[in-house]
Amino acid sequence: MSNLIHPTASIDPGARLGKDVRVGAFTLIGPEVEIGDGTQIGSHCSLQGPTTIGKHNLIHAHVAIGGDPQDKKFEGERTTLVIGDGNTFREFCTVNRGTGQGGGETRIGDGNWFLAYVHIAHDCRVGNQCVLSNNATLAGHVTVEDHVILSGFVGVHQFCRIGAHAFVGMGAFVNGDVPPFVMVAQSDYSRPRGINSEGMKRRGFSSERIAMVKRAYRALYMGDAKLDEAKLEIAEIASSSEDVRAFLDFIERGERPLLR
């Protein structure tokens, strides 16, 4: 198959399109935009560069990808956006490039679902197989690891990290790091509410692996121990659990306060 470009679309000569790319009506593709094979782009979209988009992505109508970061410190320096393969962007999603002060790059992995009105700000990192539901918003410099689910209207503060397999419930405002496997629910400020055991089961985690993560969670969140004391207890559990080692490593690498 050849590319299928609507006659009203505007594609800059400096853009590069792979094979079997489809572009809908009134879509604008700027210079230094590279689009991989089999990607489909709906109508009224805006794709600005420097941006690299991988193969077989599905970009619905009115999506804005690769725009300038919403950061007053940005002064037009060259920054990039990199998107992997097999992602879905539903209507009115926005994804910004990085900033010079933040490493210069926003990066998204493979197989993610971004539902309507999701915003991914400058210098964010999103892993693989994540779901960001309607109106979920990532401020700048946020890291979202693999297999994370953010429910509708979740807001994540800048520089926060969301660990792999975590689940954040509808309307939660996240202002601290969320360790791997942890579930967060809304309150006055969002607080951990257990581990995402159902999601872990669906991804093939054994009952033994889940039990070890539960032990680490109890040590961190359900006792009276101070953080340093809890980490010592988690380190003992981690000696026989790779999952808990990842849990502890995530905590140790934090720059933001831990959501606790």
Image (tube, rainbow, N blue to C red):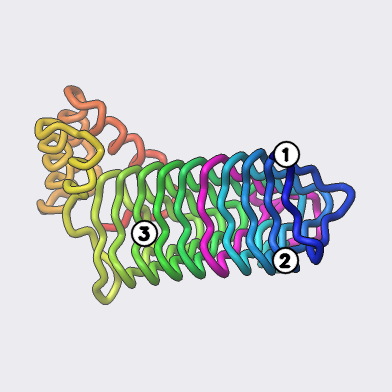
Q: Which residue is mark 3?
A: 150
Q: Mark 3 belongs to which amino acid?
A: Leu
Magenta residues (range):
74-102
Q: Residue furthest bottom?
A: 188
Quadrant for residue 210, please give it.
Answer: top left
Amino acid at the residue labelled 2: Ala
Name which quarter of the figure residue 45 lies in.
bottom right
Describe residue 168's horizontal placement relative to residue 23 as left or right.
Answer: left
The one nearer the camera, 71 or 260, is: 71
Residue 190, picture quadrant? bottom left
Q: Position of residue 198 (x, y in %)?
A: 17, 48
Give the residue at mark 1: 18
| 2, above or below 65, in the image | above
Asked if 192 appears above or below 237 in the picture, the reply is below
Q: Nearer the viewer, residue 1 or 36?
A: 1
Foreground mark, 2 or 3, reads 2
Residue at 72% x, 39% y is: 18
Q: Secondary structure at mark 3?
A: strand
Name the residue rendered at 55%, 46% in the picture.
108
Viewer-closest of 124 and 60: 60
Q: CA distance from mark 1 to mark 2?
A: 19 Å
Is any part of residue 9 visible from this angle?
yes
Q: Residues within 10 Å of mark 2 (few under 14, many from 20)?
A: some
Q: Is residue 229 visible?
A: no
User: In the displayed image of the protein, which residue is found farthest to the top?
Assistant: 240
Kindly identify which residue carries mark 2: 25
The residue sitting at the front extreme is 1
Q: Relative to 132, is 38 on the left or the right?
A: right
Residue in the image at 51% along x and 62% along y:
90
Residue 216: image location, x then y, percent:
17, 40
Find the distance from the CA under tag 1 to the CA under tag 3.
31 Å
